[in-house]
Amino acid sequence: MTVNIIQRVQYEPPTWGFDQMAITVPLGTTVTWKSVSHNSEGHTSTSNGHVWDSQLIKPGDTWSFTFAKAGRYPYHCGLHPWMTGVVDVQPTRSLRSPSKAYEI
Ligand SMILES: [Cu+2]
């Protein structure tokens, strides 16, 4: 799962952000943030709850984090706090619950 860090209009900071503001992934997913912007100062993916901090992601660079615990994880860019997103990590890989229909 990749989230692109974008600057919709290069010289209009309010238009900068993550191309998918909210993603839902299964437990164990590795999410990669990739800067496709041209901003040489870079951006970060920083968990609001201090779960992760990418440090600076420069243009063309990527940074990944693997989610080992289910939950809802809001995050932002450390340099530009209006750039926000959220990762929803589901507790199981399967959406189906076990059926008891055939139990004896
Ligand atoms: Cu930023």
Image (cartoon, helix red, strand yellow):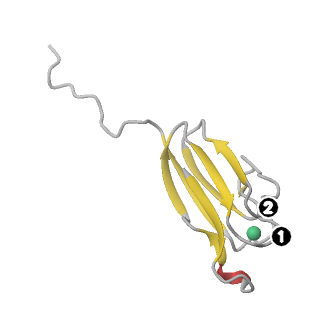
State the residue at coordinates (15%, 25%).
101
The Cα–Cα distance between marks 2 and 1, rounded to whole angstroms, is 6 Å
- Residue 6: where, in percent of width, then height? 65, 70
Tag 1 residue: 40
Specify the quadrant of the image occupied by residue 29: top right
Indicate whether 84 appears above or below 63: below
Give amino acid for label 1.
Ser
State the residue at coordinates (44%, 36%).
92
Indicate whether 61 appears above or below 83: above
In the visual, does 88 lie left or right of 94? Answer: right
Tag 2 residue: 58
Outermost residue to the right:
41
Residue 94: give its label. none
Q: Are marks 2 and 1 in contact (CB under 8 Å)?
A: yes
Closer to the camera, 72 or 23? 23
- Residue 22: where, in percent of width, then height? 53, 61
